[in-house]
Image (cartoon, helix red, strand yellow):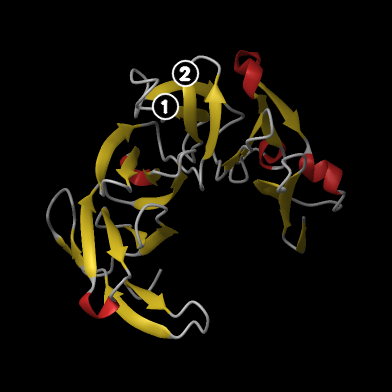
Amino acid sequence: YWPPQYTIMDGATLEPLKVVSTRGMTVDTQEYHPEPRVAAIVASHQHPEFIVNVKETGQILLVNYEDINNLKTTTIGAARFLHDGGWDSAKRYFLTAANQSNKIAVVDSKDQKLTALIDVDKIPHPGRGANFVHPQYGPVWVTSALGNEKVTLIGTDPVKHQDQAWKVATVLKGQGGGSLFVKSHPKSQHLYVDTPLNPDPKIAQSVAVFDIGNLDAGYKVLPIADWANLGEGPKRVVQPEYNAAGDEVWFSVWKRQGAAL
């Protein structure tokens, strides 16, 4: 997070080629911020650009790396406290959380502009988010939250599902707050939601799994920490990740004396 800058490096050697400061003005109060941190950095699928979240200023930078000696940057004003985010299923729209502003910013990476700022509940924390096709609302992108139990589904298809596009389509009830990551897979019918920062040990040591075809049925709880058999003491289960085939899900299990995967 410090110093307040991003660095463009040689991909083969990791030699630093260009260091750029992120100090600047906040999007809302237009005040100078001396140490705005860089959060998510993702590569555009549409242009030779990196998308850079500047946390405290709320600026999203589209940094064109074709000619770094004559650097071109598009600055998009979003919302303060930008953090992590991920792509819609078509890899055109980047959806990212401004967590302390309780918003999801949507950037059209093809047209290089802000598409929407979506109000969500307290402290969204999607990781990269999750994509699947909802039986009613079509393609959706999912975020969970640190500050509450809600799992928010946002419509991502402005062509065939205009009424739901860039809006909260529906909200699922998860185990509780303290979630960091959600995960799905194109070949899986399940959505996984972790809760490692929940104060209840039973919730922090397990994950919720939803059946995408029957979301109204609610979630089932998987006691991952118990299955890990790490002995006594507090544990936290975090960050579900599918294998490439989509038929297996891995979890990290944290424990003070060690961890398991």
> Label 1 to label 2, Cα distance in Å?
7 Å
In x, y percent, where is residue 229?
Answer: 87, 49
Disc ID at residue 155: 1
- Among the two numbered marks 1 and 2 on one chain, the one whose residue lies closer to the N terminus: 2
In x, y percent, where is residue 105?
Answer: 32, 41
Q: Residue at x 34, y 29 (%)?
A: 166
Compared across the picture, whether 238 is left or right of 6 comes to right
Nearer to us in this view, 162 or 143: 162
Q: Residue at x 72, y 42 (%)?
A: 205
Q: Is residue 21 above or below residue 217?
A: below
Q: Residues within 10 Å of mark 2 (few under 14, many from 20)?
A: many
Q: Secondary structure at mark 1?
A: strand
Disc ID at residue 88: none
In x, y percent, where is residue 79?
Answer: 26, 46
Q: Which residue is mark 2?
A: 137
Residue lying furthest left: 30
Q: Residue at x 46, y 39 (%)?
A: 90
Nearer to us in this view, 191 or 226: 191
Quadrant (top left/top right/bottom left/bottom right) for the C terminus: bottom right
Q: Amino acid at mark 1?
A: Gly
Q: Quadrant of residue 135?
A: top right
Tell me if label 1 and label 2 are in contact, CB under 8 Å: yes
The answer, for residue 150, to whether it is visible in the render is yes
Q: Amino acid at mark 2?
A: Tyr
Compared across the picture, whether 153 is left or right of 164 comes to right
